[in-house]
Amino acid sequence: MKVLVVGGAGYIGSHAARVLRRNGHEALIYDNLSTGYARLANGFEFIQADMADSKTLTSALRHVDAVMHFAAHAYVGESVENPRKYFRNNVEAGLTLLNTCVDCGVQKIIFSSTCAVYGVPVKVPITEDTPRDPVNPYGVTKLVFERALEAYDRAYGLRFASLRYFNAAGADESGEIGELHDPETHLIPAALEAVVGVRPQLEVFGTDYPTPDGTCVRDYIHVNDLAEAHVLALKHLEQGGSSVAVNLGTGRGTSVKEILDAVEKATGRPVPRRVGPRRPGDPPALVADPSRAQQLLKWKATRSLDDIVATAWKWMQNSRTVALHK
Ligand code: UDP
């Protein structure tokens, strides 16, 4: 199938484009480069345009069978400070994409959703039946889009997969692409930055949580495991399967301290660190129950935490070499 990968020059979208290709599909990347990087789209047909630009979208959608939608702003803290930016892009421009799909007869869409739609869950591991009750504007914008998909399915027969990611991490095994955020706020790349001295130290956000070692617990999932779930969701829709909403996680919780141990093991160097206060809005533990994705999509995460850290480290070394020689 030919797939329009909206946001394909970003972290997860660029991995999905490669995994699509490795599975015999064709990927057309569409990205406004507001947070994406042209180098992550290297080697792909690429349209630089905004999702709100319905004219350019229309001409792109005429040539594809399905859409994967990754083009969202995704910083929780920023969404609290500047909700307007989040509603404009994630909801308003997102609906332009959805409406244009309907108008062009594109009936299959895979959507990057998030465990943030659950807010602070009443219990972990989190199943898809957990009430969706987001606690920040970012999560609200993702929930609005999920709701729009449900309504469009009922009314227009659009079929969708809402894939609720837990903590995406790691990089393509090739070392050619990986996580590239400015500023970098995510734990694993931030810890690697502390190892190489790009930042003086890693700040551990709280050690007084009600968890076994006092630091927050998350479900870290390799970005290529996520990308493979997208391809399986596409296959599910292609074979006439009905719309789905599933968690994408490993079912395994890892604490901040355990991540820092894994980073030290992979790099053979210490992670300079200091303990800071809790980061507002961080729930103590978020871990997926991924059994529905296993059942409906025949998907399971296959990469370990060591794979995640090793590929992230390889990518950081490669991208620093590229940056130094630019
Ligand atoms: N974290 C931390 N120091 C950092 C960045 C993150 O202690 O510099 C913690 C954070 O509190 C959370 C976990 O690491 O418990 C994962 O955070 P990240 O920002 O990577 O992902 P999130 O869970 O917010 O999507």
Image (cartoon, grey):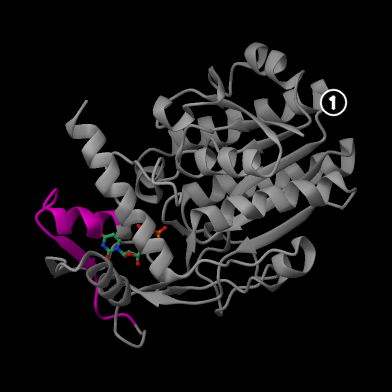
The magenta segment = 189-209
User: 227 left or right of 206?
Assistant: right
Percent of width and height locating residue 230: 66, 49
Percent of width and height locating residue 80: 39, 47
- Examine the image and state in which quarter residue 156 appears: top right
Determine the secondary structure under disc 1: loop
- Vertical arrangement, residue 59 with respect to residue 306, above or below: above
Report if residue 114 is visible in the image. Answer: no
- Vertical arrangement, residue 287 with respect to residue 191, above or below: below
- Examine the image and state in which quarter residue 177 appears: top left
**Label 1 packing within 10 angstroms: few (<14), some (14-19), many (20+):** some
Instruction: Give the residue displayed 42% in from the left and 25% down from the top.
Output: 38
Percent of width and height locating residue 176: 40, 40
Quarter of the picture holding the N terminus: top right
User: 202 left or right of 8?
Assistant: left
Quarter of the picture holding the C terminus: top left
The residue type indicated by label 1 comes to Gly
Percent of width and height locating residue 82: 38, 38
In terms of depth relative to the viewer, which is nearer, 323 or 124? 323
Instruction: Give the residue displayed 65% in from the left and 72% down from the top.
Output: 127
- Examine the image and state in which quarter residue 148 appears: top right
In terms of depth relative to the viewer, which is nearer, 301 or 289? 301
Q: Is residue 194 magenta?
A: yes
Q: Residue beneath label 1, please?
A: 105
